[in-house]
Amino acid sequence: MKLLTFQLHLWSFVAVTLVHGQDVKLSTDIMALPSRIAFGSCADHEKPQPILRDVVGRRPDVFVYLGDNIYGDTEDMEVLKAKYGQLGAKPEFQALRAVVPTLAIWDDHDYGANDAGKEYPKKEDSRGIFLDFWQVPTDSARRSHLGIYHSHLFTENSRTLQIILLDTRTFRDPLAHNTVSAWKNDYHPDTNPDKTLLGEIQWKWLAEELRKPADVRIIASSIQFGHQHNGWESWTNLPHELLKMISTIRDAKANGVVFISGDVHWGEISVLDVEGLYPLHDVTASGLNKDWDDVEPNQNRHGPVVREFNFGMIEIDWIVTDPVIALSITDVHGKTRVTKRLPLSTLAIGNEPSKAD
């Protein structure tokens, strides 16, 4: 009965999305202004995913898949389709999709190869399979450009939420493999300014999106943004691109930005203090049914790390004068392990980092 009641409280609306100046109407069942956004990543399609039933129990207005939604790792597109089929056949996945609208981006394993970037030869074929599986409408502007980046605006009662979906794979140059003892794990920061993570076209698009009026902006990145470099994949491997993100937000005068990310197989909240901007929060929810033996140090971590299977939540109280954004990570046992509450006014350009602790 709870699921039925929740479903009846959803209603259809039309969100207008602009990509490269083209109006696209996206029919969906997301509430006009979501206040409960759930998200997660890293889901082995061959194993049970009981945590999805816990997600449904939290009654989110939308769920964002942050990549590694399956472990494809193939150049055989029939194999990739079959693995998506395994995910789609799971009862717990079907239960989620029946009552919770979903948005999705990809990471390396559902893109097609471990740590792959623009060199992956089947990226266009994989893109088509991705868009079809996630039921992206045939007339969506998301199908009219390279990559799978996109943006949604939701407005009600003079408040606006923007959800920006990044593509960190299609355009990314090769990373610098670690060959020196000064660094650990697979990669070290590459200072080559000619290398890109998002690519010129996506960067231009993102700058335009961030200039659109919005109160809260959730930027979905498959890889971590706000943490301490640890040698695994993240924005810290291309530090000039991380700085470009900061300057793009600052130049657009975009308040209210919060990052969500996945990939690493543990959950944490990172806070990157940025002089002249405001603290940039990155909620990493990973994985839905994947974990990792060793958790890396992170000097930007807020609260404890979550080693068990987990998902993230952003809950926004739109009713109060200064909307409150509550960040949290919940484990597979249904226990909320780490939280942080942010008055929206603390995510305004010019706020000193100490004001948003």
Image (spheres, rainbow, N blue to C red):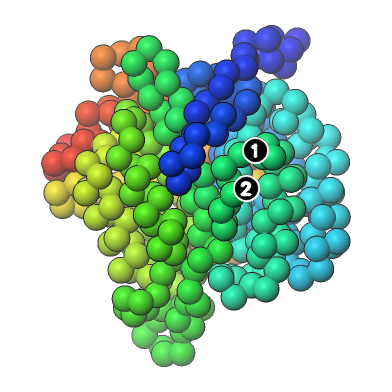
In the rendered image, residue 128, in percent from the top left (x then y), is placed at 71, 53
**SS category of the residue bearing label 2:** helix
**Is 151 positioned to the left or the right of 108 in the image?**
left
Q: Is residue 177 left or right of residue 111?
A: left
Q: What is the quadrant of residue 132 in the picture?
A: top right
Which corner quadrant holds the N terminus?
top right
Q: For residue 194, which numbered disc appears in the image?
A: none
Where 271 falls versus 339 (above or below)? below
- Residues at circles 1 and 2 in contact by the CB criterion of under 8 Å: yes
C-alpha gap between disc 1 and disc 2:
7 Å
Specify the quadrant of the image occupied by residue 218: top left
| Residue 51 appears in the picture as rendered | no
329 lies left or right of 123: left
Task: Please state which of residues 86 and 332 is positioned toward the viewer in this rendering.
Answer: 86
At horizontal 83% and vertical 35% (from top left) the residue drawn is: 91
Rate crowding at label 2 as few (under 14), some (14 to 19) or many (20 or more) other CA atoms within 10 Å: some
The residue at 63%/26% (across/down) is: 28
Name the one closer to the observer, 253 or 280: 253
Q: Local crowd at mark 1 within 10 Å, few (<14), some, or many (≥20)?
A: few
Q: Which of the pair 324/130 is nearer the observer?
A: 130
In the picture, residue 354 is in which quadrant?
A: top left
**Residue 30 in picture, x, y percent from top left:** 58, 23
Q: Quadrant of the C terminus?
A: top left
Q: Nearer the viewer, residue 227 or 93?
A: 93
Disc 1 target residue: 139
Vertical arrangement, residue 196 with respect to residue 55, above or below:
below
- Residue sitting at x 63%, y 22%: 29
**Kind of residue at badge 2:** Arg
Residue 166 seen in the figure: yes
Amino acid identity at mark 1: Asp
Query: Could you say whether the residue bearing mark 1 is in a helix, strand or loop?
Result: loop
The image's mark for residue 143 is 2
